[in-house]
Each structure stands twice: as C-alpha cells, then as structure tokens.
Image (cartoon, grey):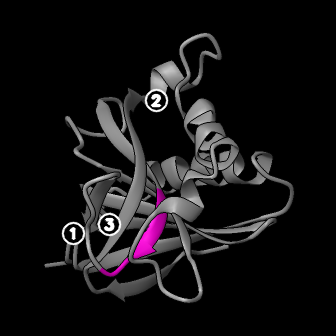
Amino acid sequence: MKPLIKQVTEFRVAGLAVRTKNCDEFDSSRAKIPALWGTLFATDALNSIPHQPSEPAVFGVYSGYESDASGEYDLTVGALVSAAGHEFSHVAICDGDYLVFEARGAMPAALIQTWGQVWAYFEQHPEQARCYKTDFEQYLGEQAVDVFIGIKKSA
C-alpha cells in the first residue's frame, strides 16, 4: 500500500526514553526497545504521566537522530500530553509533512514488517527524502499502528 502524506502540527509526548541504534535493535542481546516498552506497561508508568487528555493516546517517538537510519537516535515511549512535566522525558513532534505507513495485524511482527516497508520505500524513492527530525508511531489499538515519517518538502 502506498503511504499517504499528512500535515502534522506540533504536539508533545511524555514517557520513558532510551538512546539506541538500529543495528543494536537487530541483536536481541543489545536491543533496548523491547525492555523500554515492557517497563512502560509493567510499572504502570503510562497511567502515571500527568497532563494526558481524557482519551489517552500512546506513541513511540523517534528523535535526536545522529545522522540517518544507521545512526543513533532517541526513542520516547509514552502518551500525548498538553504540558511537559518533570517526572518523565518529553519530546515535541515537529510540524511538517509526514508519510504515513499502516501496520495492521499481530504486534510486534506487523510493526517490524512495516518498518521494513518504510526503509524499502525510501530506497526505491530517492526523490522523497526523510527529515530525520522526528518520526513517530501512533498506537490505535492492539493490532493497529500508524508510522509517521517526517519528510522534506518537495521543491
């Protein structure tokens, strides 16, 4: 399925964060992301994040890119918030255009497959460049995640 372009206005997410890189995440002995998500839910941290709307929204936000998909980045997992607190890490999602890829099915397999589609898409479409400012996953349910990839404006 071809991704859609959506305009996103800035918003904030607060939660738990880690710095990692993709080559580490492909090695289960060095992967940090599964433990980060596990901690978020096992400790009930998600429900402890202040300033959430009445309808909570769960996100994974990729930011602080060292370079590109091969470099280090920060991942913040948590909730949409109206204000940043001091107890949790927080990140602002940048305004701009995003390509949206849909992950549907059993997680995390469907999400991992979708990230493979993201990387393949940009290899096959060099005219479409990533910003590497903020990218994010919006969790819509147990078997639905939308992956938003920030893109540069076309000339």
As drawn, 107 above or below 100:
above
Q: Which residues are magenta?
A: 78-82
Q: Which residue is mark 2?
A: 22
Q: Residue at x 33, y 41 (%)?
A: 74
User: Dot 1, how many residues are within 10 Å of its Cα: few (below 14), some (14-19), or many (20+)?
Assistant: some
Do tag 3 and tag 2 residues touch (Cβ < 8 Å)?
Answer: no
Callout 2 secondary element: helix
Residue 62 rendering spot, x and y as whole percentages: 37, 51
Of the two numbered discs 1 and 3 in the rendering, the one whose residue sits closer to the viewer: 3
The verdict on residue 79 being magenta is yes
Residue 97 found in image quarter? bottom left
> Where's residue 102, x and y in %?
65, 70
Q: Which secondary structure class fits the magenta region best? A: strand
Indicate whether 45 appears above or below 20.
below
Label 2 to label 1: alpha-carbon separation? 22 Å
In the image, 95: left or right of 39? left
Per the rendering, the mark at residue 150 is 3
Q: What is the three-letter code of the residue carrying label 3?
A: Gly
Tell me the residue at 85%/62% (across/down): 105
40 w.r.t. 52: above or below: above
Side of 40 where 20 appears, left or right: left
| Residue 150 x %, y % | 32, 66
Name the spot of residue 114 as percent of width and height, x first.
65, 55
Residue at x 56%, y 59% (from the top left corner): 46
Q: Is 140 within the magenta?
A: no
List the residue tagged with mark 1: 152
Mark 2 nearby-residue class (10 Å; few <14, some 14–19, many ≥20):
few
* In the rendered image, the vertical position of residue 108 relative to residue 29, given as above or below: below
Q: Disc 2 residue type?
A: Asn
| Left or right of residue 30: residue 139 | right
Determine if residue 107 is in view.
yes
